[in-house]
Image (tube, rainbow, N blue to C red):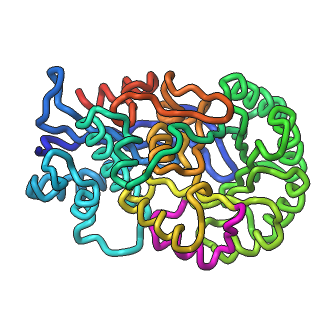
Amino acid sequence: MIIKELRELTVPLRGNISNALVNFSEHTVSLVAVVTEVVRNGKPVTGIAFDSIGRYAQGGLLRERFFPRLLAARPESLLDASGRRFDPAKVHACAMRNEKPGGHGDRAAAVGALELAFWDLNAKLDDEPAFQTISRAHGVSRLRDDVDVYAAGGYYYPGDPCAILRDELLRYRDMGFSAFKMKIGGADLATDVARVEAALEVAGDGSRLAVDANGRFSVDEAAAYGKAMAQYGLRWFEEACDPLDFDANRRFIEGYPGAVATGENLFSAADVRNLLRFGGMRADRDIFQMDAGLSYGLTEYGRILAEMDAHGYRRAQLYPHGGHLINLHIAVGLQLGGCEAYPGVFQPFGGYCDDCVAGDGRIAPSSAPGFGLERKPELREAIGQLLA
């Protein structure tokens, strides 16, 4: 088993949407392929993955640092004991050779995309969906092959903010989603309160609506928003303050009785350990959103899960950020609490393929080998360019 070629394609996100801090019209994603010498149906078996959504591509890092390290390694040094699959932990270790601890940033996403492509490859070599490969590798017994899901959207657009939001969530409800997440912090408090109330007209109950400030607020601003939002009994309040200011997170939690969520901007087990030690998170209600595609892949994600276990938190509290097929497989494979979906934004990566149908607040991956990215219509053009 050898790597014949490693490829990266920088793919722009489609659309012009904004949250409280960021406009996504210039954002890109790294789509990565691991091409092997194994041929099936006249084509080489190829692992495909990407980093995640809402950041920038890492093509330079991949081509200049991480691809050369793997291609220079002895082929057998990257294989598992059977010799017929790659060992993602060995891939991770090889990619990280000569990298100092800390200073994660884009490096974490570059390695994440690369390592995840090997999970897709291994699943294809075994002709099974990736969630089965993930479960077996992590010793997880699955009780169900579907997970809780919510539709994420509610960004800021020109026009009537309440009418636009209400119409968007109605479209998601028609797709089979019964829980939703919307953005706050990109308008004044009064406007956002009106938007929340408009969203509740569709959600029907605060337990089916989460809000996300994307780290927009100071502690005082967060407290004011928290006071206004507490009356609605929301599913959670996400990233009120800077995600690396654990003391601010703790102070916000002390004044907000509902569930909070954070973690999508933590890229290592050490980051998560500090959140658990100093961030005030509560084991009986709060939500964690670490994303393997931004966190060096599933090897580091396993270490993150071990930190949560050691501190008394449950896997049911994990809802990975991203809203895409890869994290759906991870959530099912590791039996996490659930996942988000981007059914209306962040194409071509957001959302799932046509045979992943939402219903009763849950969703299951398809039976396609690997992550099934080739089955997503919006991704076919980009994957075709990557493999051409």
The quadrant in which residue 133 appears is top left
Residue 68 shows up from this direction: no
Q: Residue at coordinates 32% horizontally, 45% vertically from top-left?
A: 119
Residue 60 drawn at (x, y percent):
30, 52
x, y (%) of residue 203? 80, 36
How many discs appear? Answer: 0
In the rendered image, residue 327, in percent from the top left (x then y), is placed at 48, 44
In the rendered image, the vertical position of residue 189 relative to residue 1, given as above or below: below
Is residue 157 one of those drawn in magenta? no
- The magenta segment is 265-285
Q: Quadrant of residue 171?
A: top right
In front: 255, or 298?
298
Identity of the residue drawn at 39% across and 31% down: 372
Is 288 on the left-hand or right-hand side of 114? right
Looking at the figure, which quarter contains the C terminus?
top left
Q: Is residue 260 above or below residue 8?
A: below
Say which of 207 and 217 sits in front.
207
Image coordinates for residue 232, horizontal then vertical, percent: 88, 50
Q: Is residue 292 above or below residue 325?
A: below
